[in-house]
Image (tube, rainbow, N blue to C red):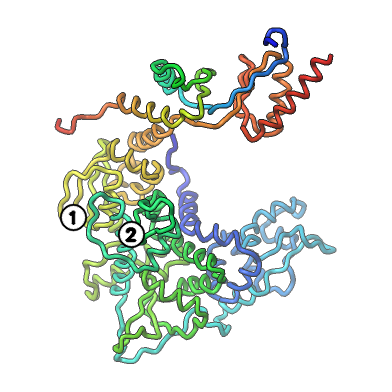
């Protein structure tokens, strides 16, 4: 049974932070050199890409950023305190993430008199230098917009509230569509629904031929359920990457929009920014769309038109800073509002501490201290809610509900991850693991019940001659098509894709053996 | 040509290879034993954890197994 690893908390944390941008990483991995040249024109993008690299790569890049020479493998080895005679692959391995982001080129490509070397990408180098020195003219960190006294000026808590409400209303819409008795929810913007549909998070199941998909009759898919259980940061990047792919599918380069995301990630909350830096029409369109997700807030002018400035919300300003920064930002704002008294108090529903509301007992009972409709709806996916008070939900993890959730495509790992990340501070007072082993095991067992059978299409060859059997077995292994061999009964099970090849082989062997 | 006269004969059967735990396999054998004629689905009982079954019956077989497993699951009376 798989147990969470407590012996090495640092490692677990590293995996967690890398996973929140997993969607972005996967997207970037498929892009070509020209795409990177495009986004590296933005200083903000250079900085954000740098932040996402592993520590060792950041160290190397910052060490060589002011150098005019290509980076030599001997210098790298010296920097990393490696033996000068250690194999090149060892160094190459360390800078591999940077090579993937086209900052360096593979070391094997260029060999000079004194060993291998690689240049640093010029556009990236210039961008990062500008980012570090605050020079450059692209204004990719945003151009502050001077507000006149009559302009609307939202406070930080108002922005957080706007962001949370908008984002959660989308999630609520998704989860409500999957319930028998949905609760009343606002319909998100059509552009949002279209993206939810194209990303496969929601689909119109009543229309099987897929031609007349109605955005209003969509229900959540198993992919969508999995999406709901992810943490906020992961969800945001998944949606943003879906957004990028949807732009690409229209034949437009998504690079300016990705630069825009990175710019937003470097901005400050409560600062107003001018739209004038984002000249590209796709960027302007993207800014319009981002408002419907709650990533930016753009006040309306008295005349009704949209203002030509906007405020980023905490959802976008934390994009490039990992989970810890998001929670830190939330914690500080909570302190601020409690002191200043500017916040409404009610809307602050998703502070990192407020997220930890769940107590799970060894008898499978769950006490969830929450009144957030979204969280209750998510809990309702896999637990049997017995009692619901104003600030407390009591229920039980039972087989029927967990199995129903698993039917929808949610795995035991996701339920466990959700329970773990929402565990009440009280749960930490007992010795680890946070979740009791019996419950974790039981969830895995329920998951396994689903697929007790593994089925593979197969061709069975039944032999009488031991020699022929052994020769054919070796041949099938060579084709990598052997599913199972039973020497006792001289049976071979091979993949249907190699059936013909094996048949020909057997015929050839038979001819030979009979001829002897 | 009978198989005895030709030691190099090879018999070929297509189907779906099922890998499962031995308890599940026994249930499959039991379900199969209650069906007759063309609706039998097991082609070959291979060993403790493998059987070869007919491709066309695979979905119904999975459903029957699920029904059987559900019957063997203890569900506590909610009123107690």
Q: Are marks 1 and 2 in contact (CB under 8 Å)?
A: no
SS state under label 2? helix
Question: In the image, is A477 to the left or to the right of B40?
Answer: right
Examine the rendering and report whether any part of residue A355 can be seen: yes
**How many neighbours does mark 2 have within 10 angstroms: few (below 14), some (14-19), or many (20 or more)?**
many
Q: Please, is residue A221 above or below residue B37 in the view?
A: below
**Of B73 and A321, which appears nearest the observer?**
B73
Is label 1 on the same chain as label 2?
Answer: yes
The N terminus of chain A lies in quadrant: top left
SS state under label 1? loop
Residue ID at (24%, 73%): A343
Q: Please, is residue A208 above or below residue A292 in the view?
A: above
Residue ID at (46%, 29%): B58
Image coordinates for residue A421, horizontal then vertical, percent: 36, 51
Q: Please, is residue A513 above or below residue A208 in the view?
A: above
Q: How many marks?
A: 2
Chain-order first, disc 1 or disc 2: 2
Question: What label does residue A391 carry, if any?
Answer: 1
> Quadrant location of residue A74?
bottom right
| Label 1 to label 2: alpha-carbon separation | 21 Å
Image coordinates for residue A309, horizontal then vertical, percent: 40, 84
**For mark 2, what is the residue?**
A171
Q: Chain of mark 1?
A: A
> Quadrant location of residue B27?
top left
């Amino acid at each position: 049974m798989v147990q969470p690893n407590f012996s090495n908390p640092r490692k677990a944390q590293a995996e967690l932070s890398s996973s929140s941008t997993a969607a972005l990483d996967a997207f970037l991995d498929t892009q070509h050199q020209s795409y990177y040249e495009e986004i590296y024109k933005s200083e903000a993008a250079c900085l954000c890409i740098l932040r996402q690299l592993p520590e060792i790569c950041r160290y190397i890049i910052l060490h060589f950023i002011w150098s005019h020479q290509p980076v030599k493998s001997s210098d790298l080895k010296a920097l990393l305190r490696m033996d000068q005679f250690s194999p090149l692959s060892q160094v190459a391995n360390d800078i591999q993430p940077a090579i993937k982001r086209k900052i360096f080129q593979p070391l094997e490509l260029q060999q000079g008199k004194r060993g291998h070397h690689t240049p640093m990408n010029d556009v990236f180098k210039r961008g990062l230098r500008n980012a570090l020195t605050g020079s450059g003219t692209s204004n990719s960190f945003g151009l502050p917009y001077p507000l006149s006294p009559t302009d609307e000026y939202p406070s930080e808590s108002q922005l957080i509230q706007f962001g949370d409400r908008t984002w959660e209303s989308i999630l609520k819409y998704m989860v409500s569509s999957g319930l028998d008795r949905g609760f009343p929810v606002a319909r998100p913007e059509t552009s949002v629904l279209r993206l939810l549909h194209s990303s496969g998070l929601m689909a119109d199941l009543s229309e099987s031929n897929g031609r007349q998909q109605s955005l209003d009759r969509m229900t959540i898919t198993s992919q969508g359920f999995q999406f709901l259980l992810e943490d906020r940061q992961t969800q945001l990047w998944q949606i943003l990457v879906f957004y990028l792919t949807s732009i690409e599918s229209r034949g437009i380069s998504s690079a300016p929009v990705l630069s825009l995301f990175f710019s937003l990630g470097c901005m400050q909350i409560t600062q107003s920014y001018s739209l004038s830096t984002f000249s590209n029409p796709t960027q302007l369109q993207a800014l319009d769309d981002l408002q419907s997700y709650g990533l930016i807030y753009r006040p309306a002018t008295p005349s009704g038109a949209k203002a030509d400035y906007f405020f980023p919300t905490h959802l976008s300003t934390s994009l490039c800073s990992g989970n810890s920064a998001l929670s830190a930002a939330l914690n500080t704002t909570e302190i601020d509002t409690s002191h200043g008294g500017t916040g409404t108090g009610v809307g602050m529903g998703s502070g990192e501490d407020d997220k930890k509301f769940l107590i799970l007992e060894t008898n499978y009972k769950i006490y969830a201290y929450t009144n957030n409709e979204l969280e209750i709806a998510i809990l309702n996916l896999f637990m049997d809610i017995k009692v619901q008070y104003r600030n407390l939900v009591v229920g039980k993890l039972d087989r029927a509900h967990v199995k129903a959730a698993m039917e929808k495509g949610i795995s035991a790992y996701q339920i466990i991850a959700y329970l773990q990340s929402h565990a009440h501070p009280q749960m930490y007072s007992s010795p680890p693991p946070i979740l009791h082993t019996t419950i974790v095991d039981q969830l895995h067992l329920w998951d396994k019940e689903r697929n007790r059978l593994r089925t593979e299409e197969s061709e069975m060859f039944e032999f009488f001659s031991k020699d022929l059997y052994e020769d054919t077995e070796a041949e099938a292994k060579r084709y990598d098509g052997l599913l199972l061999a039973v020497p006792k009964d001289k049976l071979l099970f091979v993949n249907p894709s190699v059936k013909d090849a094996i048949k020909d082989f057997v015929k050839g062997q038979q001819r030979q053996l009979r001829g002897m | 040509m009978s198989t005895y006269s030709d030691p190099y004969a090879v018999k070929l059967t297509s189907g779906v290879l099922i890998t499962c735990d031995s308890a599940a396999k026994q249930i499959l054998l039991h379900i199969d034993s209650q069906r007759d004629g063309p609706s039998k689905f097991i082609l070959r009982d291979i060993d403790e954890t493998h059987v070869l079954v007919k491709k066309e019956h695979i979905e119904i077989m999975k459903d029957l197994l699920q029904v059987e497993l559900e019957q063997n699951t203890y569900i506590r009376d909610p009123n107690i």
